[in-house]
Image: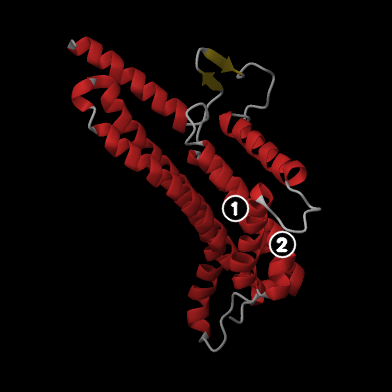
Amino acid sequence: MSAEQNVDKMQEVVDHITHHVLDGHAWSIGPLHLDFAGANLPPWFKLSGLMGIFAAGLLCWLYCKVYDQKARVPRGITNFLESVVVFVRDDISIANLGKADGRQYAWLFLTQFTLILTLNLMGLIPVFTTATASLGVTGAFAFTTFAAMLYLGIERFGFLGFLKNFVPHGIPVPVLILLVPIEIAGVFIKAIVLSIRLFANMLAGHIVLFAMTGLIVIYGAPALPAIFGGLFVYFLEILVAFLQAYIFTMLSAIFVGQVLHPEH
């Protein structure tokens, strides 16, 4: 293969990677190419938004249609869906918010966990794009945690009481002048860290995966051993999809629990 052909192949691989992991307005499914940039949609509506609609629709279908509420003994997909609910409620929500608050706000963390996990796994299917590799998407998820921290904290303690929780007891006033702004800024920093952590992990993993498969596309048979590395990374990405959904939801529950129970 000539140098020019190599360059063309490399450009094709780069274009495919950027299309899959970066947000845009075009969606390719085999020979079908959909470009909804001029479809009178809001400018913020991109592929990540379309993936979000698919994921939300899939989850609504699973929990509203497939899930058998009348079954005395859950089986099959019903048992799996119920296990997810129990896991998030008991091991994430109640574990970090206490029994009363954990049961009351389990819906928030269940929504985060199932939606993030679905988007992560959809990103491993070639015809879909990786919505959670978009900082806008992960930022939106982090904003739900940030909004919950503010709303639930103010609802429980009142506005002044909520602010008072940022003032540690027994600390000299000169130290408080420096410490209180840092404590308040910490609320914003926690949300920012949540969004960047999920975004960076999903983006990096997919770039590595496509880079390995790209070697085969560019160099052909001599690069076939890279397929084993690609398979390893692919299965690792499945694990990462579950792990990152769990970590995001767990940290969200911890942050909300710290606001609702500042004494701890």
Please tell me whether residue 251 is drawn above or below residue 40 in the rendered image: below
Residue reaching furthest to the bottom: 170
Q: In screen coordinates, is 241 left or right of 74?
A: left
Depth-wise, is mark 2 or mark 1 nearer the camera? 1
Quarter that holds the N terminus: top left
Q: Are marks 2 and 1 in contact (CB under 8 Å)?
A: no
| Residue at the spot 73% in from the left edge and 43% down from the top edge | 66
SS label for mark 1:
helix
Q: How many angstroms separate mark 2 from mark 1 (CA)?
A: 20 Å
| Residue at the spot 79% in from the left edge and 52% down from the top edge | 69
Among the two numbered marks 2 and 1 on one chain, the one whose residue lies closer to the N terminus: 1
| Residue at the spot 28% in from the left edge and 36% down from the top edge | 228
Task: Give whichever of 98, 37 is nearer the camera.
Answer: 98
Quarter that holds the C terminus: bottom right
Question: What's the residue type where badge 2 is placed?
Answer: Tyr
Please give the residue where the numbered disc 2 appears in the rendered image: 151
Question: What's the residue type where badge 1 is placed?
Answer: Phe
Residue 113: give its label: 1
Q: In screen coordinates, is 129 left or right of 231?
A: right
Task: Give whichever of 111, 42 is nearer the camera.
Answer: 111
Task: Give whichever of 31, 82 is nearer the camera.
Answer: 82
| Quarter assignment of residue 184 | bottom right
SS label for mark 2:
helix
| Residue at the spot 48% in from the left edge and 74% down from the top edge | 178
Question: In this orientation, does residue 131 appear?
Answer: no
**Location of residue 213 in the rendering, given as x and y in whole percent from the top left corner:** 32, 29
Instruction: Report crowding for label 1: few under 14, some 14 to 19, many 20 or more residues within 10 A (C-alpha).
Output: many
Please tell me whether residue 1 is drawn above or below residue 226 in the rendered image: above
**Location of residue 126 in the rendering, given as x and y in whole percent from the top left corner:** 47, 28
| Quarter assignment of residue 109 | bottom right
